[in-house]
Amino acid sequence: MSRIGKKPIELPANVTCERTGNAIKVAGPRGELTTIIPEKVEVVMDQTKVLVKRHSDSREDRSYHGLVRTLIQNMITGVSTGYEKSLEIVGVGFKAEAEGRNLKLTIGYSSPIIYAVPEGIDLKIEKATNIILSGIDKEKVGKVAAEIRRIKKPEPYKGKGIKYANEQVRRKVGKSVGA
């Protein structure tokens, strides 16, 4: 048995989970999410918990077992509490501004970069150098954070660029002056 897949998922009181065909729909106070589950696994639900079972012990079935359980757990957490990613902008004169559904980044290029934030993601700017992304879909929040970080990754000499709030940038020593 998969160590992750065999654990039951506890449903909070304000979250409902229902299965329609091969789709699982989870609804809660922050919204609702739907995902398609493969036919290799079976999802058993009651009022307080969700259990994922697999049909056989083949390699493919075992891999789907843990995956489907984690996807359902992420959906339940998303609709009940949500997910949040924080980004920091490091550099003199570097800043971020919110313009409606767009993020305007002034990060050392000749013109500002405009990034369109997709639906389902909330954007909050603190102190012009901290970007907070939040939403109910863990995958989408992480993807948007990675796309914003990719615009200007932190460089190893001065650490300038966009980094995750908890990220440690490996620093390199600069040129040494010959004596």
Image: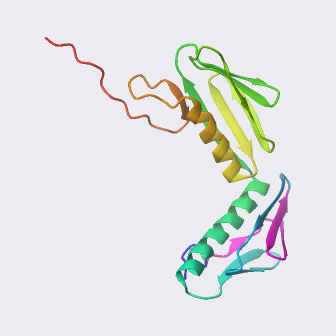
Image position, residue 2 (x, y; %): 55, 78
Examine the structure image and report whether residue 93 is included in the region drawn in magenta.
no
Percent coordinates x, y for residue 36 in the rendering: 76, 68
Inspect this view and state whether residue 143 appears: yes
Q: Residue at x 68, y 35 (%)?
A: 132
Q: 48 left or right of 61?
A: right
Nearer the observer, 59 or 67: 59
Which residue: 67% across, 76% down?
8
Q: Position of residue 39 (x, y in %)?
A: 71, 79
Q: Residue at x 73, y 72 (%)?
A: 37
Q: Quadrant of residue 20?
A: bottom right
Residue 15, visible in the rendered structure: no
Q: Where does the magenta region start and end?
A: 7-28
Residue at the image point whose x is 76% and y is 64% from the top: 35
Classify residue 119 by image quadrant. top right
Counting labels gives: 0
Point out the image quarter for the N terminus.
bottom right
Q: In the shown orientation, is residue 102 left or right of residue 86?
A: right
**Going by the picture, which residue comes out furthest to the left?**
179
Tell me if residue 129 comes above or below residue 45 in the rendering.
above
Residue 120 percent coordinates (x, y) = 80, 45
24 falls in the magenta region: yes
Identify the residue at the far top of this view: 179
Residue 99: image quadrant is: top right
> According to the image, what is the colour scheme of the structure?
rainbow
Residue sitting nearer the eye, 59 or 123:
59
Q: Quadrant of the C terminus?
A: top left
